[in-house]
Structure formats: structure tokens, C-alpha cells
Amino acid sequence: MIEAFTSLEKAAKGMNLFINQEKTKYMPATKNSHASYRHYLEVGPYNFQVVYSFTYLESEVNCNNDISAEIQKLILATNRCFHGMRKHLRSHLTSKSTKTLMSKVLIRPVLTYASETWPLSKINEQRLSLFERKVLQCIFGVQQQKETWRERYRYELYETFKEPNIVNYIKAKRLAWT
């Protein structure tokens, strides 16, 4: 790491660029990153602050590569978007195709922002799927079965939606990104 920094510093000086010690941070990326609990890393005359997470382009990056907090933040943001449009999504005056389009164009992109780099765990997949089913349930509503009403089953929602579920959508985005 020190060798890489010194070669970076040398190349930067060749172009009249200088490294700002206040803005440059160091994040360890090992299995036991928190084991040392260092506050500063010394490289020559520089002292860089050691951080274990930071925000980059509105996405949280941490040394454990855990995206649970990031996904929870996106679910909350998407939930605000969903509640803002809920009146239209529940309206009988709006067609199902328009509601589906609103979901694909306005809700899904908020939920999947920067998902190309996510290492999804089963728990995070379940959280995303649960939220998507909540939106689809709102769009497609309940179904009458004889004399009673019931919520649609998962497979019925996705048959009507005619799009891959959120997890498969994210996996496809990841493949397209590489």
C-alpha cells in the first residue's frame, strides 16, 4: 500500500498535482479491519485518517462490504416515493398498464440505485422482494374468489406484472454492467 501511494504521489507531482492530507482517507480492506483500531496511518510525511465506512456518490462503502444499511436506506427512500404515488396506484381510474409502467419507471430505479455492485445476501434479497410485493399488491389489488376476497399469491402477482422479480432484475443489471 505504501509503495502504491509513493508511486501515486510521484506521478501526481509530475503533473503538478498534490495530495491533500485533509481530504484523503484510508480504509482497510482485510478480514479483521477493526482489529487494529488505528486512527491514523503514517506514510512518509503524511498522516491519513483511518475510516471504516464513507459515502461515495450517495452510496455507503464500508470495509466489511456489508450493504444492509444501504439497502435499508434505499427501501426507505423508495417507500416515500411509493406513498407519494399511492393515490394513483390504488385508483380505479388509472389502468393497470399505466400503474405497472409507473412502478417500472418511477419506483424500481429508486430501489435499485447503484445495485450493479451489490453483493446480495439472502436476507437482503428477501427485504427487496418483500417491498416489491407490497408495491405489486397495491397495484393489482385483491382478487375475488367465489364470495370472498383474497390477496393475490406471489406467482399471480408476477404473472400479471410480466417482469422479472427485483432480485433477478438486479442480477441482470450486474451482468449488463460488467
Image (cartoon, helix red, strand yellow):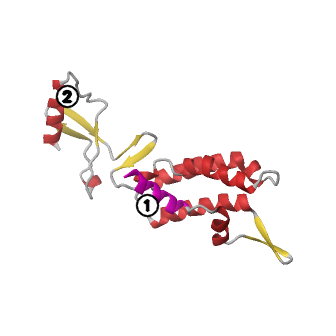
Quadrant occupied by the N terminus: top left
Q: Is residue 101 above or below residue 13?
A: below
81 relative to 91 in the view: left or right: left
Q: Is residue 4 above or below residue 120?
A: above
Secondary element at tag 2 = helix
Write down the region rendered in magenta: 166-178
Judge the density around disc 2: few (<14), some (14-19), many (≥20) Cα neighbours within 10 Å.
few
126 relative to 136 in the view: left or right: left
Q: Of the residues under marks 1 and 2, which one precedes in the sequence?
A: 2
Residue 56 appears at what percent x and percent y? 40, 40
State the residue at coordinates (71%, 47%).
85
> Could you tell me if residue 19 is visible in this image?
yes
For label 2, the residue is 12
Based on the picture, tell me whether residue 175 belongs to the magenta stretch: yes
Residue 31 appears at what percent x and percent y? 27, 58
Residue 168 appears at what percent x and percent y? 50, 62
Residue 50 or 123: which is nearer the viewer? Answer: 123
State the residue at coordinates (28%, 34%).
24
Q: Is residue 168 above or below residue 80?
A: below
Which residue ends up furthest to the top in the rendered image? 16
Judge the density around disc 1: few (<14), some (14-19), many (≥20) Cα neighbours within 10 Å.
some
